[in-house]
Image (tube, rainbow, N blue to C red):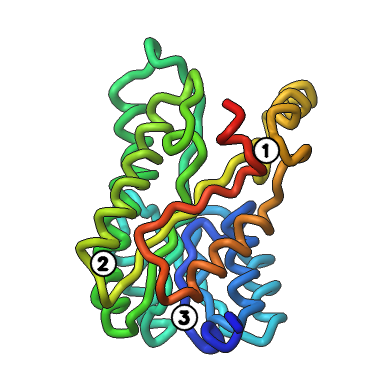
Amino acid sequence: MDEIVLRGKRALVTGAAVRVGRVIAVELARAGMNIAVHTRSTPADEALEQIRALGVTAVLVRGDQSVDAARIVAEAATALGGLDLVVCSAAAFAQVPAEQLDRASFDAMLAANLTGPFFLMQAALRHLRASRGSVVNLVDLCGTAQVWKGYAHYAASKAGLAALTRLLALEWAPAVRVNAVAPGVALYPDSATREERERTSLRIPAGQTGAPEDVARTVRFLASQPFITGQILTVDGGRSVNP
């Protein structure tokens, strides 16, 4: 059913060159959506090729969303002829004890994960109003249902984006829906040790870590449901109920 709803529609997916963002972009392409693949600097050739192989349009948009949000949206909308969906997936991630956090690091995290996505959504609003489209933000278990030691600036940025999700759903209704997905462990950082991965897995009631595809399917679901807005869907295998 969602393929009928989404086929031929146009999506901008930030951070779509690699990792979870790329899997989201490919999943939306499988539903028939044309995709603007955003990346700041990471090569995106493989992502573009994978999406085009599904028989849809894929265009590349480069830029730093913390400073270039309006241009990123303008280029995507021009290339695709408008926008029906914006997925704010690009994000920074770092672990620093709160007592050691300096102002520059804190501000940079908020710029990447909160301020940038806000102005991206704001820039996309006129296009989404015209198409009665939607936004899906990627927040996190950390900053919504839980907080983790060492991630003060990251948790604050994701908590802020979660709050904006609910607020913008209220302000921009009924023309534009705004939702979010809060993943637990969908893809470990490359730096995660085997011991860290095993320890985390033991805390997940589902008995296993998730996968980027779990997140992507949830984004696709939210993009296709006209009566869901202002919601944050947690995709974590139950970890949020086992802090």
Q: Position of residue 111 (x, y in %)?
A: 32, 42
The image quarter in which residue 220 lies = bottom right
**Location of residue 137 with respect to 97 vertically, above or below:** below
Q: Residue furthest top?
A: 99
Residue type at the position of mark 3: Arg
In the image, what residue type sits under mark 1? Tyr
Answer few, some or many: residues within 10 Å of disc 3's Cα (few below 14, many 20 plus, some between 14 and 19): many
| Earlier-in-chain disc, 3 versus 1 | 3
Q: Which residue occupies 40% across, 60% down?
A: 179
Which of the 4 quarters of the picture holds residue 99? top left
The vertical placement of 226 against 164, above or below, is: below
Q: Earlier in the sequence, mark 1 or mark 2?
A: 2
Q: SS class of the residue under badge 1?
A: loop
- 79 w.r.t. 154: above or below: below
Judge left or right: residue 195 versus residue 10. Answer: right
Horizontally, residue 196 falls left or right of residue 69, namely right
Look at label 2 and name its amino acid. Ala
Q: Which label sits on residue 188?
A: 1
Q: Which mark is residue 123?
A: 2
Q: Residue at x 66, y 80 (%)?
A: 52
Of callouts 2 and 3, which one flags the residue occurring earlier in the amino acid sequence?
Answer: 3
- Quadrant position of the N terminus in the picture: bottom right
Question: Which image quadrant for residue 201?
Answer: top right
Q: Residue at x 25, y 54 (%)?
A: 167
Residue under label 3? 10
Label 2: how many Cα within 10 Å (few below 14, some 14–19, many 20+): some
- Where's residue 241, x and y in %? 58, 34
- Residue 205's x, y, as percent? 71, 36
Left or right, 140 with respect to 81, comes to right
Mark 3 element type = strand
Using the numbered discs, state the Cα–Cα distance from disc 3 to disc 1 in whole angstroms: 29 Å
